Image (cartoon, coloured by chain):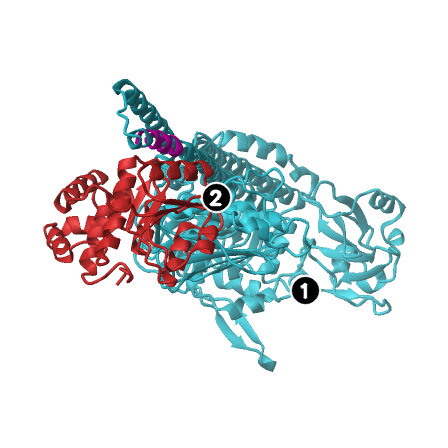
Chain colours: A cyan, B red
Amino acid sequence: MAVNSVDLTNCDSEPVHTPGYIQAFGALVVASESDLVIGHASANCKQYLSQVPQDLLGLHLSAFLGPDLFADLQSRSLVPTRPDYLNPLKCQFSDGQGNRRTLDCLVHAHDENILLEFFEAPPDTVEHDGLEIVRRQIVSEPTLPRSSSEICTAAARMFRRFTGYDRVMVYRFHEDNHGEVVAESTDQPDSFLGLHYPASDIPEPVRRLFAASTIRMIADVDDEPISVLADPDSGDQRPIDLSHAKLRGVSPIHVEYLRNMGVRASLSAPIVVKGRLWGLISCHHSGPKALPLRLLHTCELIGSIVASFLHGLRSSEHLDALLAVQALSHHIERRCHEGMSLFEALRLYAPSVNHRLKTDTLVVQIGDDGFVAGEKLEQIPNLSVLRSHAVAGMLVSDHLGNFDGRVLTGGNACAGGALLMLSEDGSDYVFLGRRNYAHTVTWGGDITKSVTVEEGGRLRISPRRSFQAFKQTVSGRSRPFESGQRELLGHFRRSLVALRSAERERLAWREKEIAEANQAVMQAQLLHSARISSMGELASSIAHELAQPLTAITNYVNACRQEIRNLGQTLPADISELMDDALAEADRAGAIVHGLRNFIEHGDLEPSELNIEESVRDGVGLMISGGLAFGVEVALDIDGNLPKVWADPVQIEQVLFNLVRNAAEAMDGGSEKRVAVSAKLNEKREVEVTVRDSGPGVPSEVKAAIFHPFQTTKRGGLGIGLSVCRTIIEAHGGRIWLADTQPGAEFHFTLPVG
Amino acid sequence: MAEKLPVFVVDDDASVLKSLKALIRAHGHPTFTYASAEEFLADYDEDMKGCLLLDVRMPGMNGLTLQSRLESKKSSLPVVIITGHGDVPRAVQAMKAGAIDFIEKPFSDEVLLESISRAHAIIERGGPALGDAEDAVERLNQLTPREREVLDQLVLGHPNKMIAHELRISPRTVEIHRARIKEKLGARSLSDLIRTIMAARAPSSSLMTSPNH
């Protein structure tokens, strides 16, 4: 829409509520709320009250109204209400020639003033119970209107029948405040139905007055405005705030606007739904026209009834939509509870999501997974750009081009949409896109107003003169997101956020469980391997120890036989046989021991290509996680370019575990506890690992046999750890030794490069 | 009967030491026993003649260390290594360092006597410790390239499983190769295989020089 922003600025700054003059169909008297002394009076007081305004200024209200009326006034609440014509004061004033005139007086307090507006009272004969008629008519109109346009059409028809205006229209304001005529009743040949009017036709201050106030009548734009005189002796010379005054003067711009349209009198009743100006019932008349207060009252009631109908309709529509979205959320939630991921659940319900939220395409991104469902729209905006504009996790717009500066053309462009952020880190979101809605808007006249430059360089607008229909094709926007739909999107988002956060918590928990389970498995493996190794070690040393006596037995028997031969004696066959049996049994004993050891050791070497750095980290990490290295500072220095070795990872970790644990235990009670683990490639091109501690070192009497089983300096230790280490390292073709250092202990082991 | 070769036995286990002395003596060899490597070194002199029967695994100075000490003293004692079961890598190491043979505990007297007589033969010849190099080369040449690869791994003391992985073949195949190799080389034991290889690699080596070249 090509609306010049200059117009709006100018119009919006116009002081419409304090014009300083009133319309001619009544008189105004204003008293200060604090002292009840009249400070302002309209210039036409003589005509209505038979007193010149100058005589009224400075008068106390009680003196002006007389004791009865004054008492009546004081008993009332003067706060402006809506509807506010419930009970006008009935006043009688003498015209100075013995005649008494009856006037209706509307009183309200505003901005520290009490405003009294005097109107001609219609003769009693004309009075009728308008409210009752309205009620009856509304009930007899299409009984329960099913759509807002039915309600509006009925309202327009009723209004015109009642008031006799030439033309009654119902405007509806869109989200961007531009108006559209959605219903019309007229006896004129031309029709305004379906025409759009720019937002600037009803400037923001006027809009505020409509929303806050009530019905507005302009009796005749050709009437001379009546100025409001102020008491020159009063200190307060501010113009009176006429926001709630029926007589409030008409702004010259509006007068010109109406004249250009050929309208002399008008009536506008606001339709306020849920505190928002939904629209207007607007009446135009080609001649002057002022309604008596009672009819005005009835019109206002009709406006209120229309509003409540619309409210009811909207509420029920909104409720239906809300229930549908809640049902959808519930379905998704149930799937998630059944164990489906939010991602899959959204994919399953994607068509329903688009249907319920009236969108064309659905883009879902949950962590690393994403999908697009629905229609293939083009030019889906850069979502990370949109994200930066999101407020409270949401961005909704029918004009996404605003945000990433694209020109959206073509029917398949994604012109509008809603971005719903599902997590604070921005990794989960849902985008609902709406396609470009290219359509023709018929404006009630060329929407460009002429701008003239006033003295002093200030821009001033003149309303357009032509109201010839002006067609404009609108593109680059989607169908608008109405406030109810925004609310639905908010609901939907909140339920998805809750589901996603629960899901994330669950995933994090599961990951933690898996990690813990993995560690438990590793520790179990290590423990198992330690046990196997210890058993193997035990079996090995039993085998070794048993091999000695068995060897001795064999040797002795063989020696015996030889000695008998040496004596020149022939061994009797049965004795020789007994000796053979002894040897065979010794052999068998040896075989059993070897068999036992082989059985225990069987398969305990599971070599694979091994990165020593990982082993070191895992071995040391296991110790730390097991709480065994409390208070010990472990420093790693591992050459990053070490070649892979061919070794059993669990076994090598066990060696590291043993060495580091020994180091930590050796330093127990010391003040400085440091363990340094380093790995490098030595001159023989073997991987050499060193574990050095800051403890007291190994006592010299233990050094020689430190790798033998059952050697220990530790209380409660079996003395098997280092001998297990040796078994493992030697089984890998490596070497293990204790370096001759002081202080501290320094163990080295090597592994051949695989 | 020719004069029996003296045998020096070093073993930390007293009962083994005593039984060995009884057995070897019964076969007529003068026998001297030592409970540790240190004890033997203390008694050692260059003129010692005989066979050194050495337990490889001992507290304090082990067999291998004693071997290298002797080598540094230009000792001419042929060394036979006694190992526990399954201590092959160490035995291989000892062979490379100049041991003429190794036997695994417990052993029969035939095996022991054979080693001692091998030592005797070497001393008698005063020459090559390892047998005919040309013969060894010829035998090795009968092996297929794959068998040769397996052999190279075997003499490093690697277990079958490791060889299988190294050569990307199954352990069963290693077993088959192993049997073929023994057959082709006329070897009865691992020590025979090691000797053959070392003989082929060092055609002119004598017992005194290191066979590692």
Please report whichever mark, 1 or 2, sits nearer to the chain's N-terminal start: 1
Report the magenta residues as a range. Answer: A551-562
Residue A560 within the segment the image draws in magenta: yes
Q: Is most of the magenta stretch helix, strand or loop?
A: helix
The residue carrying pointer 1 sits among few (fewer than 14), some (14 to 19) or many (20 or more) residues within 10 Å by Cα, namely many
* Of A463 and A334, the residue lying toward us: A334
Q: Is residue A459 above or below residue A12?
A: below
Residue pointed to by mark 2: A723
Describe the element under mark 2 as helix, strand or loop: helix
Picture quarter containing residue A195? Answer: bottom left
- Image coordinates of residue A478 in percent, x first then y, are 39, 53
Mark 1 and mark 2 in contact? Answer it, CB < 8 Å. no
Residue at position x 50%, y 39% in the image: A516
* Of B31 and A333, the residue lying toward us: B31
* Residue A321 showing in the rendered view: no
**Quadrant of the rendering where the C terminus of chain B is positioned:** bottom left
Query: Residue lying furthest bottom in this view?
Result: A456
